[in-house]
Image (tube, rainbow, N blue to C red):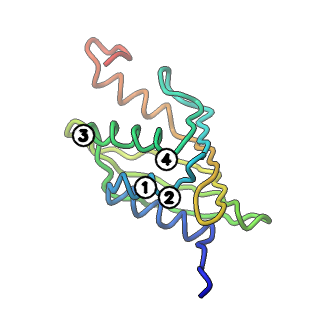
Amino acid sequence: MTRTVPGAREVFDRFLAASVENRWDDLADLYAEDVILEMPFTLPGVPRVTQGREELRRRFHAAAGARRVTKADNVVVHETANPAVLVAEFDLHQEMRGEVFAVSYVMVVTVEDGLIKHTRDYTDTAAAAERIKAWSPAGTSAG
């Protein structure tokens, strides 16, 4: 029997569903063991490069203690000339410390053998920085 390997679009759809349903282990399982996640525009203290599925799993669980994703919208997926690569734009609605907000994302995702092998994530870090500043004592970025 031939095993069907999901393509980039199907993997991205699973990624979005696991994110919105806050299924952090399922989300981590969508990544290859040796995945590389790049975040070129990130906040101070957040790594620009993360390597490995288990490190992502750890980070997903750590973030889960502080926030909850409630929905995704404005989802646009751009297929590329390479069927293993797609570009996705979307907004994630989240709750943190009783506040509801949305953050915009753009991801360039490479899928191999049905798993995310590489991703470059562009996040609205200005919105995140404003959120952190609003929650921090005396309006500092600490906290």
Q: Is residue 13 left or right of residue 40?
A: left
How far is the residue under mark 2 from the one under mark 4?
21 Å
Give the labeled residue for mark 3: 99
Amino acid type, callout 3: Glu
Amino acid type, callout 1: Leu
Q: What is the secondary structure assignment of the residue under circle 4?
A: strand
Q: Earlier in the sequence, mark 4 or mark 3?
A: 3
Nearer-the-camera pick, 142 or 131: 142
Nearer-the-camera pick, 54 or 66: 54
User: Disc 4 or disc 1, which is closer to the eye?
Assistant: 1
* Above or below, 14 relative to 100: below
Q: Picture quarter containing residue 83?
A: bottom right
User: Disc 3 or disc 1, which is closer to the eye?
Assistant: 1
Q: How many other residues sit within 10 Å of disc 1, few (<14), some (14-19) or many (≥20)?
A: many
Q: How many other residues sit within 10 Å of disc 4, few (<14), some (14-19) or many (≥20)?
A: some
Residue furthest left in the image: 98
Q: What is the secondary structure assignment of the residue under circle 1?
A: helix
Q: Cβ–Cβ below 8 Å for labels 2 and 1?
A: yes
Q: How many other residues sit within 10 Å of disc 2, few (<14), some (14-19) or many (≥20)?
A: many
Give the labeled residue for mark 4: 104
Q: Earlier in the sequence, mark 2 or mark 4?
A: 2
Q: Is residue 139 left or right of residue 42?
A: left
Q: Earlier in the sequence, mark 3 or mark 2?
A: 2
Rendering coords of residue 141 (x, y %): 38, 17
How far is the residue under mark 3 from the one under mark 2?
29 Å
Tell how many labels.
4
Identify the residue at image location x=41%, y=64%.
17
Rendering coords of residue 37 (x, y %): 59, 42
* Above or below, 134 relative to 66: above
How far is the residue under mark 4 from the one under mark 1?
19 Å
Rendering coords of residue 70 (x, y %): 30, 55
